[in-house]
Amino acid sequence: MWLFLTALAAEPDAASQVQALLPLVEETRGLASDEPIAAKILTPEQATERMAEGFLPEEIVRFEHESVLLRQIGLLDQDYDFQTYLQAFTRNNVGGFWDVNHQDMVVISKHTQHIKRIVRHELVHALQDQRFDIRVRTDGTIPNDDLITAFSMLMEGDAAYTDALINADASSLPPFPRQVPPQPEMALPRFQQEEMAAQYTLGPWYVQQLHTEGGWEAVNQAYDHPPLSTEMVLHPEKRSGPDIDYPQRIEFQPWPGYSSVYENTFGELSIALALRLRGSTEPWTQAEGWDGDRFALLERDGQTVVVWRSVWDQPHQAARFAESARSWLERVDPDVVVDLQGVGVVVVSGAPPGASAKLVQRAWKAKLTEAHTVVELLGREPSKLIVEKAAERDESN
C-alpha cells in the first residue's frame, strides 16, 4: 500500500470523486485505466486495521529485528513499538492509500477536507498497479530497503509530479528542490520519518528529471528498469550513460558461533539521513561515493551484535565515512570497532570482548558482485508475495 501524507481534513464520497477526477489524471499522466477503480472512506480505526492486515507474519518479524538493530546503533528509542507507532501514524498523518491487497482506494474520514488531492494522488498509484510491474514494492520480504526506497521514490514522485502537472504546464513548473527539508513532527520515530519524507520530497525531483529528459516514456521505462539504489536517484549522472554506477551486492559468509537473524542494506540516502540525525553538518558529502553496503544482526546466547560492511568508490570516501561513522557510533557503543581497508569499511557493534576481531575478519570475506538488475541484486525474482498470501488468507476465511 502507498500512503498520501496530509495534516488536513473533511468532505465525503470517495467513489464519486474517483469518477470525476479519473479522466483528468489519465490525461495528465498519459495512462488509461484498464478496469474500474473502487474507493471508500474509512475511519482512522478501520484504516489502521486494514493496514495491519496487509502485513505478513514474515514482515512483522522483520520489523521487530530491524527495530533491534536500529536501537543498537542509536536510531530508535529503546521504548519503540512498531504496532503503537503504526496506529498513531495512521490516525494522525495518513490521508489515504491505495490498497494493493483489496485493490481499492481508501480515504480516511479524518482527512477528507483535501479529498480531491488525496484521490488524484492515489489514482496515480492505482494506474501504476494496473500498468507496471511493481513487485519490488509489493514483496515485503525483500531484504534491501535501499532498493525499496529507490522504487518508492519513483512511485511517489510519479504521483506527486502528476498532481503538480494538473495545475501547471511542464514548461512552467518550477524545479522541485533537490533536498529533504526538516519535516514537521509526525507520529513516527525521527529516522523513519526522514526516510519516508524523502520519498515525497526527492521523489518528485527525480521524476521531474526523467520527464524533462524523455517525457512520460522515460518515466514508464523506469518501471521496467528501476533504480537499483538511492544513489541512482540522487545522482542523475550515475544512472545512465557511460558512467552508470551499479551497486555492489554483498553476500556474507556464515558466522561461526552466531545465528544471522536479519540482513538489510542502508544505502546512500539512509546513511546521509542517519548522519544528519546524529549531528553531522555534512551528511550528504559524507555519504557520497557509496557503492554498496550490507548489515547483519547476529545473535548468540541472547545477545545481539551488528556487523556492517560498506564499499565506496574511492579510498578517501571510505576514510571519510569511517571517520563519521566512528564519531556517530562511539556515542552509542564506546567499544564499537570501525575497520578501514582501501575502499571498504567494516563496523562491529555490541560484540563481547575478544569477539570483534574475528567478526571483522569474517566480514572482509564477504562476496562482492556488481549488480546490473533487480534479480542480480536480490539473487532472486521479486514476487507479489503479499498479494498472493492475502488472497490465500481471504479464501481461508
Image (cartoon, rainbow, N blue to C red):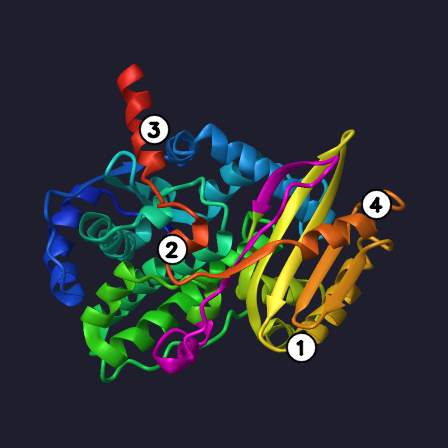
Residue depicted at x 62% and y 78%: 314
Nearest the viewer among 192 and 258 is 258
- Residue 187 lies, with reference to residue 218, above or below; the image says above
Q: Which residue is mark 3?
A: 389
Please say whether residue 8 is visible from this viewpoint: no
Residue 283 x, y percent position in the rendering: 64, 72
Q: Which residue is mark 4?
A: 355
Amino acid of disc 4: Ala
Q: Which residue is mark 2?
A: 374
Residue 154 x, y percent position in the rendering: 35, 62
Element type at mark 3: helix
Highlighted magenta segment, given as a residue range = 234-263
Q: Of all residues shown, which one is farthest toward the top? A: 397
Distance from the alpha carbon under mark 1 to that under mark 3: 45 Å
Q: Which mark is residue 315?
A: 1
Left or right: where 170 falls relative to 302: left
Q: Of all residues shown, which one is farthest toward the right? A: 353
Distance from the alpha carbon under mark 4 to that under mark 1: 27 Å
Labels 1 and 3: the sequence-earlier one? 1
Left or right: where 372 falls relative to 12: right
Rendered image quadrant of residue 173: bottom left
